[in-house]
Amino acid sequence: MDLTALRSFHEVCQQGSISAAAQALGYTQSAVSRQLATLEAALRGPLLQRHARGVQPTEAGEALLAHAAAILARVEQATEEVAAARTRQPARLRVGAVPTAVGHLLPRALTAYAATDPGVRVSFAEGVTPRLLPRLRDGKLDLVVVTDYPPGLPVLDGVRVLHLLDDRLYLALPRTHRLAGRGPVDLADLADEAWVEDYAGAAAVLTSACGRAGFTPRVEIETGGWMGKLAFVAAGFGVCLVPGLLVPAIRADVTVCELRDPPVRAVYAALRDRDARTGPAARFAEALAGVARP
């Protein structure tokens, strides 16, 4: 397969039309059409079918698309590594993680990892689990730290998942709250409270935990990101659940209380099977496992 044609096919599928793909790639529409024709000839069958709003992959096209992103990512990675070897630039490790892992777990892991691989340049990207795992599978990231919060971790071919720790959830309160400073708190004591939450998946975990305690939480503030959530809690607009990984980084004007029978989420490192035994990703996974141990 011609890589230029494969890249054009992937872009057409992403954009939904040949003209939009041509514009994104900087080619003429006829050039993209010729590349697609070359690819279809090489694979002996149609890969796209036209419809009223553009094009969509055929069954064979869907099969190719499942591999195209990974192929192109590996080519890009190979090109970078060859250039690095030629110019003696440091190798690169691309790590993705859920936001709560960035505040405490990842810096400690990087400290441990740097002692064994000082020549590797590490970059970090934040995201939620459903978006990080496909980026790992497609070769855009080398290792990701993910959770089953909301419950459930998808199984992907070619991806190995390593359990790091079980992370209890805590309760974040304003410092002046009536329950601040008390021992383990029952969620049932918060039935009349306003709650601060962000996206639907996290709210589902909150709703489930509160449902077991006999009430439906009243979410008054919806905001994305922990900085915003904790700012509203500190200002007295509500309370929220926080993972244990985040507790060391919580601002001073927020009180953290233990919950009686708290929800627990599992935290994992995921990497591709081919990287799981040797190389920077495998060694970073070992560093993560080391700092995650009690």
Image (spheres, grey):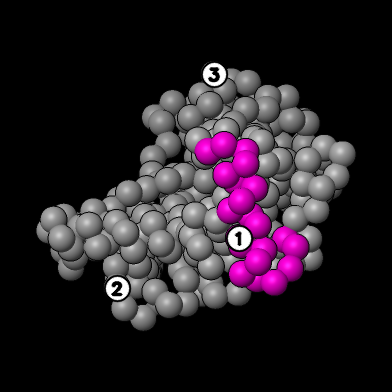
Nearest the viewer among 77 and 200 is: 77
Name the residue rendered at 71%, 37% in the picture: 190
Q: Identify the residue position indicated by label 3 in the image.
A: 235
105 above or below 157? Answer: above
> Left or right: 206 with respect to 252?
right
Name the residue rendered at 48%, 30% in the picture: 227
Query: Alpha carbon of mark 3 to alpha carbon of mark 2: how far?
Result: 46 Å
Q: Nearer the viewer, mark 1 or mark 2?
A: 1
Return the x and y of residue 144 as percentages of the image width and height. 46, 59
Mark 1: few, some, or many residues within 10 Å (few <14, many ≥20)?
A: some
Q: Can the viewer see residue 272?
A: yes
- Residue flagged by tag 1: what amino acid is it? Thr
Query: Alpha carbon of mark 3 to alpha carbon of mark 1: how far?
Result: 62 Å
206 above or below 137? Answer: above
Q: Is residue 31 magenta?
A: yes
Q: Earlier in the sequence, mark 3 or mark 1?
A: 1
Question: Which disc is residue 38 wearing?
Answer: 1
> Left or right: 149 with respect to 3?
right
Secondary structure of the residue carrying numbered label 1:
helix
Name the residue rendered at 70%, 46% in the picture: 201
Q: Is residue 258 magenta?
A: no
Return the x and y of residue 199 as percentages of the image width and height. 67, 38
Q: Earlier in the sequence, mark 3 or mark 2?
A: 3
Q: Which residues are magenta?
A: 27-47
- Residue flagged by tag 2: what amino acid is it? Gly
- Residue flagged by tag 3: what amino acid is it? Ala
